[in-house]
Amino acid sequence: MRIPSLKAEFDNFFASMTQHTDLLVKIIKTTRIILPPHEEKEILTKFLQSEKKQIHEAFVLKICATWEILAENIFVECLSRNTSKYAASKGFILPRKLTKNTCKGLISGLSYFVFRNMQDLQGKANKFLEDHYNPFKEVPNDVSKKIDEFYQIRNYIAHRSDTAKQSLKRTYKYPYKMRFRPPGSFLFDIVEFIESGESGKELRFANYTKAFEKAADEMAMFLGIR
């Protein structure tokens, strides 16, 4: 199956992810900020590790927003191709094909498309999308797990609530066997990776961005775009 109109959505997603990760790499490698001489006395020019961690925490929100835009647009496009399963689940009578704007209203109403985690997103897709138009089921379980971990981090950064903190504690404990730590410190750990037969070390943050890109790759291949 090929949906040409979605190619731009995937291109935008991967371009945004590259932009985000390239900037973060620059920040990691930067040791100081160059300022006009008259400002150097007012602002610390040395780029502290703690400051880099704060920036990485902020980018957790940007990465999630980039993913959510892609997920919603894919969902809307695929639903617009065949509404049969959605209509059956809701007890409606609908035309088999609808405009994207109408389908956006069907899944988000007057608000926005909400999903708590990958299980929730895939559950909605399985419920409302015909199998032939459901790329979300192609995301591997291990990739979904990494994305869900990232969302636990995102929820704590966004809300700082006791509930979000307890959820993140559980994420640290299983399977990492760690006590609670600030997300920036956790994401800055150097971890080993194995990919396409190659191994190496990278920031834990990169483990997560690669999971989002892998999920998008699998969906794009299902849709005949990559």
Image (cartoon, rainbow, N blue to C red):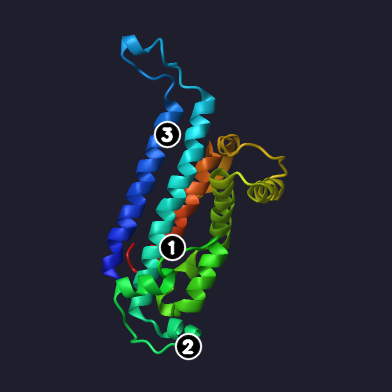
Q: Is residue 224 visible?
A: yes
- Above or below, 61 relative to 8: above
Q: From the image, tell me which residue sits under label 3.
A: 25
Q: CA distance from mark 1 to mark 3?
A: 25 Å
> At label 1, which amino acid type do we have?
Glu
Q: Which mark is residue 135?
A: none
Farthest residue to the front: give it: 110
Q: Nearer the viewer, mark 1 or mark 3?
A: 3
Which element is circle 3 on? Answer: helix
Label number found at residue 91: 2
Dot 1: element: helix
Could you classify mark 1 by the number of other residues whose Cα lies within 10 Å: few (under 14), some (14-19), or many (20 or more)? some
Q: Earlier in the sequence, mark 2 or mark 3?
A: 3
Relative to 113, is 21 above or below?
Answer: above
Task: Between label 2 and label 3, give the one nearer the viewer.
Answer: 2
As drawn, 170 above or below 10: above
Q: In the image, is 107 to the left or to the right of 151?
A: left
Total marks shown come to 3
Asked whether the viewer can see residue 1, the reply is: no
Q: Position of residue 44 (x, y in %)?
A: 45, 16
Q: Residue at x 57, y 47 (%)?
A: 159
Specify which label sits upstream in the sequence, 2 or 1: 2
Q: Quadrant of residue 25?
A: top left
What amino acid does circle 2 point to? Gly
Q: Residue at 34% across / 76% down in the picture?
A: 80
Relative vertical location of residue 41 with respect to residue 134 in this rendering, above or below: above
> Mark on residue 218?
1
What residue is at 43 percent from the left and 87 percent from the top? 92
- Dot 1 or dot 3, earlier in sequence: 3
At horizontal 57% and vertical 55% (from top left) the residue drawn is 148
**Foreground tag (2 vs 1):** 2
Q: Quadrant of the N terminus?
A: bottom left
